[in-house]
Image (cartoon, rainbow, N blue to C red):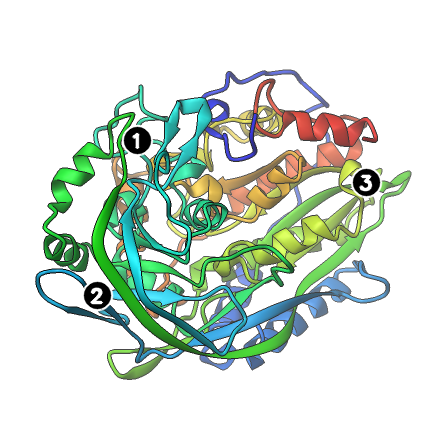
Amino acid sequence: MSMPRLAGALLAATVSVPLFAAASQPLPSFSQDNIRTTIKTLSSDEFGGRAPGSPGEKLSTDYISGKFKEYGLEPADHGSYLQEVPLKQITADPHTVLRIGGGTTPLTLAYGSEMVVSTPRPEATISLKDVPLVFAGFGIVAPEYNWNDYAGLDVKGKIVVVLVNDPGYPDGDPNLFEGKAMTYYGRWTYKYEEAARQGAAGIIIVHETGPAGYPWEVVQGSWSGPLEELDPGQAYQPAIQGWITHDAAELLFADAGLKLDELEKASQLRGFKGVPMKLTGSIVLHNTVHDIVSHNVVGLLKGASRPSEAVIYTAHWDHLGEHVVNGKTEIFHGAVDNASGIAGLLELARAYGTGPKPARSVLFIATTCEEQGLLGARYYAAHPLIPLRDTVADFNMDVMDTFGKTHDVTVRGHFMSQLEDELSTEAKTLDLKVLPDSQPEKGYYFRADHFEFAKAGVPALSIALGTDYVGHTPDWGLAQQQGYVSQRYHKPADVYDPSWDLSGMVQQLDLLYLTGRDLAESDAWPAWNPGGPFAAKRAEQRSGG
C-alpha cells in the first residue's frame, strides 16, 4: 500500500487490545493560570505572530526552553534545547500578476484578490512565458481507487489547474474515495507533490471554502509573505504553485470556452479525461531568498529504567507573523493556533518534570514551521534525537479547547492505531467518550504534526475538540468550532480572550497525561491497525529493518 493511501485505514476497524493498566498514576493538577499566561504571552503583540526566523521566534523559543529548564527537563539535542532546522525562506513580490493569453479576452489576475502563487524553488526570479494550461480534474493518481486524472495528459513544462479536495466530497458518494471524508489525495500538499512527479511547470488549485475547509482569507494569510521550505536537494519542484479564487477560475474557464461547473461535475466520474485549455499563462515572480535556521525546542525527561525508549508530546510554536491586510500591517497572533497547544505542552512538561520519573523517557517537542507544511516535524522525523524504532508514540496538540467542559473529545481522522483504543480506555476513567473526527471532510488528519510521525511509522494521534458540551445543546460545540474557522482561524482576530473557559482543555490534558504516562510506565508497543498505510513501515522499523 502506498504512503498516501489513507482511505482504507480511515475506515479500518478498531482493534481494542488493552496494552497496560489504566489510570495507574494519580492526576496532577493542571493550572489554568499557567495556561492563560502562556497563551497571552505567546500571542502578544511583542511576539509579532511568531514567524520562523523573526524576532518572535527567539522570544518564543527562549520562553519555551526556559520553561523546560525550570521544570527539570534536560536539553535533548547534544546539550541544547534547540534542534536546528535549516530552511529556505522565500518571499514573493506581492505585485506579481498572472497573465492569461490565447482566449477570447486577455486576462490579468491580481495577487491576493484573485490568486496567490509562490515558488518552492530558492531562486530570485521565476519566469514562465506563454506556458500552456491544462485542466487535470482533481489532480489525483490513486491506483487503489482505479483513478488517474493525468492519464493520457502530457503536462511536462505546463501549468495544471486542479480542483480542491477529492472526488468523493461534492456528493458524498461512499463509492468514491471515502465520500465526504477527505483522503490525503484531497490535500494541497499531495496535489503539489503529484504535479511535481508529473513534471508540471506549475500548479494552481481552484479554491472553494467548503471543500478546502477554510475561506479565501486563509489562503491570503497563509501563503503570502515569507514562506519556508526545507532544502529540496535534487528533487524536482514546480516553478510556481498556488491558488485561484473560484470566481477568477470561472472567468478563466469561460475565456477558454469552457464551463467550470460542467467540468467540476465531469471530474467526479471515474475515467474523466483532462482537458487542454488552449490558454497560456505568463508570470514573472521576483523573490527575496534567504537561508535561515529555525528551531524545534526539545526537552527530555530521562526514563528511570528504560531511558532509550521514549513517548513524545508535540505542539507547534510558530504562526504566520505579520502580513499586509487591506493596506495595513496586521499581526497574526495565533492564540488558539497554536499558543494553546504550547500551553498544553508546557503544562504536561511541568507535570512530568516535577513528578516521579516513569520507566521510559518522555520527550517534549515544540516544533517550528508547522504552518508551512509540517516542516519542523518532518525535519525531526528525518533527524530524530531518539531513534524512531525506539519511539513508542507521539501525542500532538494543535488548537486546544477554549469553550468549556465536554462529555467527549475527538481525534483527528478515524481510529487508526491502538493509541486511540488506549485513549478511549483512559477516557472512561474521566467519564469521557473518545470519538472520531467530527468534520472529516476538512482533512484535519493531514494538517497537524502527528502526520509526519505517522508517515515515518510511529503510532501518532492529534487530540481535538469535543462536540457535546456540558450545559449546551448538541449542536452548540460544532457551531463554536465552525465560527472559529470562519472568523478567526489564520486571521489577525485569533487573539487571547480572558473570558475563555479552559476547563475543557484541562480535560484534554488529563486524558493525554493518563494515556502517555501509563504508556511510559509500561513495556507495551502500540501498533497500527492491520492493513493501515503505516503498519508495514512500523513492522520493518521494529524488526530492525
Q: Which residue is mark 1?
A: 180
Q: In the current view of this chain or complex, which residue is farthest to the bottom?
A: 328
Foreground mark, 2 or 3, reads 2
Residue 176: image x %, image y %? 31, 24
- Side of 214 where 171 appears, left or right: left
10 Å neighbourhood of mark 1: few (<14), some, or many (≥20)? many
Image location (x, y in percent) of residue 170: 22, 34
Q: Position of residue 4 (x, y in %)?
A: 51, 35
**Residue lying farthest right?**
305
Q: Nearer the viewer, mark 1 or mark 3?
A: 1
Camera sees residue 23:
no
Instruction: Measure how far apart labels 1 and 3 are at the Cα level.
Output: 42 Å
Q: Is residue 227 above or below residue 165?
A: below
Residue at horizontal 56%, vertical 49%? 449
- Nearer mark to the viewer, of 2 and 1: 2
Q: Earlier in the sequence, mark 2 or mark 1?
A: 2
Of 381 and 517, nearer the camera is 381
Query: What is the total number of numbered labels drawn onto the structure image?
Result: 3
Q: Amino acid at mark 1?
A: Lys
Q: Is 541 on the left or on the right of 494, as rendered?
A: right
The answer to whether residue 311 is visible is: yes
Vertical relation: 147 (above or below) 134: above
Please, what is the three-letter code of the amino acid marked with disc 2? Ile
- Residue located beneath label 3 in the image: 358
Q: In the image, what residue type sits under mark 3?
A: Pro
In which quadrant is the C terminus drawn?
top right
Residue 100 numbered tag:
2
Instruction: Give me the C-alpha separation between circle 2 and circle 3.
Output: 62 Å
